[in-house]
């Protein structure tokens, strides 16, 4: 049992109520902290990024939290690390990316340069000692961003999965789960279907603001099916029957989809600029990291379709690639930092 008796975990609660990778992260870290700490309180802070004023309000809300009853505090996603506590460790998911590597999306407004400068200056101070006793990041992509924009180093620590067992059954179709957001680049796979020669179906699971645009891009291609929202159990079943899992985001912080694919013993196709997912790829052994080009993705799919026995070996390799990554190791390391 940990020396920490009362622990607060501070999370960023989205206004939309969507349950994505960040929400799964929150659920699982609290679940595993509870195995070692007698009292763990999850404190979700509703933070909006709709306007700059709302973003600043989120920082102030976290700063004003009274956490005096706890002897340890762990924060994660911006702006939760603005909390005040003498024993505060941050396990950073990411900062607000439109003021960092995605600034091109808002740079046309001259006023956003001053806003970016303010956010980066605030984040640098809030993530540095003594405000944070120890800083961890979920992956090398987040660590690289911290070093580039904030001049801060962090300890990279990957986290695992604990949302029940994934399994493998058949190898029937191409599977692409996740949010239908432009940063996830689902359009790359839809375009790749124009070049896929194999008689295979593409199943796209998830919801998002790009749904109608993607359906228009798919046109009358009957091989492409949009599944919409799926439950956790439906998702695991869909993974289990996939030939290959597609995950082609741009500069992804971590990427649970790759891990879910590997847990299901499926090869994964990602892109060379997809950030953390590409770091897990052993080219041709557990998947492929290719240029963000639909033709390159299509070539990999055709190869896998023609080499089903190779697919099974690649899926097993993917499973073994992440076998050492567990939540227990993560929470023990975070608690050790709090106890130090």
Image: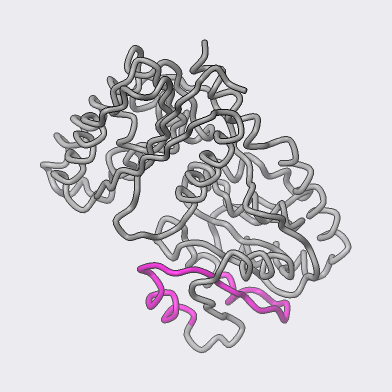
Image-quadrant location for residue 304: bottom right
Measured as percent of width and height from the top left, residue 69 is found at 34, 24
Relative side of 242 to 151, left or right: right
Relative side of 164 to 194, left or right: right
Q: Nearer the viewer, residue 224 or 67?
A: 67
Q: Nearer the viewer, residue 123 or 102?
A: 123
What span is in magenta?
191-218
Q: Is residue 200 magenta?
A: yes
Q: Is residue 286 magenta?
A: no
Measured as percent of width and height from the top left, residue 40 is found at 47, 34
Image-quadrant location for residue 167: bottom right
Q: How many marks?
A: 0
Measured as percent of width and height from the top left, residue 327 is found at 62, 37
What residue is drawn where x is 34% and y is 27%?
149
What residue is drawn where x is 23% and y is 26%?
122
Q: Nearer the viewer, residue 217 or 291?
A: 217
Q: Is residue 18 above or below residue 52?
A: below
Image-quadrant location for residue 196: bottom right
Colouring used for the render: one colour
Q: Is residue 337 above or below residue 313?
A: above
Measured as percent of width and height from the top left, residue 130 is found at 33, 12
Quadrant of the snapshot with the N terminus: top right
What residue is drawn where x is 46% and y is 34%?
142
What residue is drawn where x is 52% and y is 10%?
340
């Amino acid at each position: 049992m940990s020396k920490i008796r009362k622990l607060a975990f501070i999370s960023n609660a989205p206004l939309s109520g969507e349950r994505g990778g960040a929400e799964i992260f929150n659920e699982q870290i609290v679940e595993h902290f509870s195995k070692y700490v007698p009292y763990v309180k999850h404190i979700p802070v509703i933070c909006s990024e709709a306007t700059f004023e709302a973003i600043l309000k989120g920082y102030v809300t976290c700063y004003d939290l009274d956490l005096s009853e706890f002897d340890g505090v762990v924060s994660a996603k911006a702006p939760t690390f603005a909390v005040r506590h003498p024993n505060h460790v941050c396990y950073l998911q990411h900062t607000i990316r439109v003021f960092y590597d995605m600034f091109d999306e808002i740079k046309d407004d001259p006023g956003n340069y001053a806003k970016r400068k303010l956010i980066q200056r605030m984040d640098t101070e809030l993530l540095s000692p003594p405000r944070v006793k120890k800083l961890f990041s979920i992956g090398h992509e987040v660590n690289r961003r911290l070093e580039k924009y904030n001049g801060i180093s962090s300890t990279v620590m990957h986290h695992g999965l604990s949302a029940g067992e994934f399994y493998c059954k058949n190898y029937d179709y191409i599977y692409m789960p996740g949010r239908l957001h432009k940063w996830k680049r689902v359009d790359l796979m839809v375009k790749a279907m124009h070049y896929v020669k194999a008689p295979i179906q593409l199943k796209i699971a998830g919801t998002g603001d790009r749904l109608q645009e993607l359906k228009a891009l798919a046109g009358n291609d009957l091989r492409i099916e949009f599944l919409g929202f799926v439950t956790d159990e439906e998702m695991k079943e869909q993974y289990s029957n996939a030939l290959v899992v597609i995950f082609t985001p741009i500069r992804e912080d971590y990427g649970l989809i790759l891990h879910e694919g590997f847990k299901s013993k499926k090869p994964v196709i990602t892109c060379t600029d997809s950030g953390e997912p590409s770091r897990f790829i052993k080219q041709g052994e557990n998947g492929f990291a290719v240029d963000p080009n639909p033709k390159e993705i299509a070539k990999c799919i055709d190869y896998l379709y023609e080499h089903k026995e190779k697919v099974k070996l690649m899926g097993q390799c993917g499973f073994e690639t992440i076998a050492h990554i567990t939540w227990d190791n993560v929470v023990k390391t975070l608690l050790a930092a709090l106890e130090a």
